[in-house]
Amino acid sequence: MDTNNHNEFEGKQTTALAKRPEPLATLVNPVADIYETADNFTIKLDMPGVTKESVHVTAEPGRLAAKGEVVGRHLEGGTLLFSEIGRKSYVREFHLGEGVDHNNIQAELEDGVLMITVPKIDALKPREITVR
Amino acid sequence: MSLIRWNPVRELDRLPSDLVSVQRDINRLFDNLFRSGLPAEETLAATYFAPAVDIAEQENEYVVKVELPGVAKEDVRISVESNTLTIRGEKKQEKEEKNKNFHRVERSYGSFQRSFTLPSTVKNDKIDATFGSGILTITMPKSEEAKPKQIEVKVR
């Protein structure tokens, strides 16, 4: 076999590998911290690899959902020597109590952390009572 | 492929990160048991975690990805010493958060460290790292002698 043929064979093999369907992304529940202040509940979710465009937060009475897709393949081509991250997308749902205002929920994404601020309704906020 | 001396401790790195962190927790518990002085609560408060890592070999380089959501760029240190790549740092909890009324704490805070042995042939001075969307990407170009070469074997 001469070298040229060998190269051609190698080229075809690479194409065949590239066309192999990608493994399905694993659905993971991102870890969350939840804390409460006088006016809000704040939820922080670790979602490394998502972008503002690939993350979706939906709220309805009683239910809050956060979904995110990791954008781009984690590692382009090559041989994976060690894999703990792999391909994944995130989804997590929370139950909303009656004391929150689901119409004014805000979310921001920074350094792979999604921060969702859920405001309390006025009835639930602590009030300073004037002493007469 | 070069020969690498087998190091049983290194095998621990190949375990799933959950197992490694459980092992670290157990080690810490034992450390605390036999340590006098500091109250156990305080020593346990300083936690360690191991971020998830992917490593890929490409034709001309090795690419390492590390999941570090919420970690500041300034708090990450990458070093290469005698072919050992070490990623260490600290994930700090925001100061004003510490006094909040927490309902749930699942995210990890504290120090982290991962070490990997590199194939001996990497251009140490050309290692590049970027940080975006909570993922640290380290690119390590292979040195010339490590790139795949075709060797013709003549059959007589």
Image: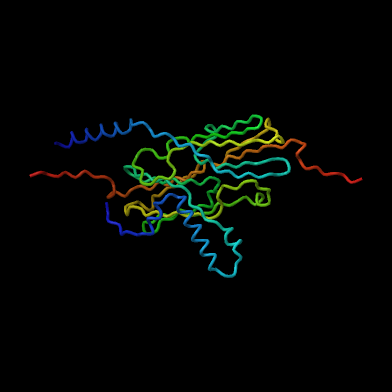
Q: In this rendering, would A123 be left or right of B60?
A: right
Q: How many marks?
A: 0
Residue at 38%, 33% (x, y): give it.
A22
Horizontal arrangement in the rendering, residue A94 relative to residue A119 (left or right): left
Q: Is A49 on the left or on the right of B80, as rendered?
A: right
In the rendered view, would you say B70 is above or below A94?
A: below
The residue depicted at 67 percent of the width and 32 percent of the height is A102
Where is residue B36? Give x, y as percent.
57, 70
How was this image coloured? rainbow
Q: What is the x, y in percent for residue B113?
A: 47, 55
Residue at the outermost left position: B156
For this orientation, the residue located farthest to the bottom is B36
Pinpoint residue A96: horizontal percent, then vertical percent: 65, 35
Identify the residue at image location x=51%, y=61%: B28
Q: Residue A67 location in percent, x, y?
A: 54, 34
Quadrant in which the C terminus of chain A is drawn: top right
Query: Which quadrant of the figure contains the N terminus of chain A?
Result: top left
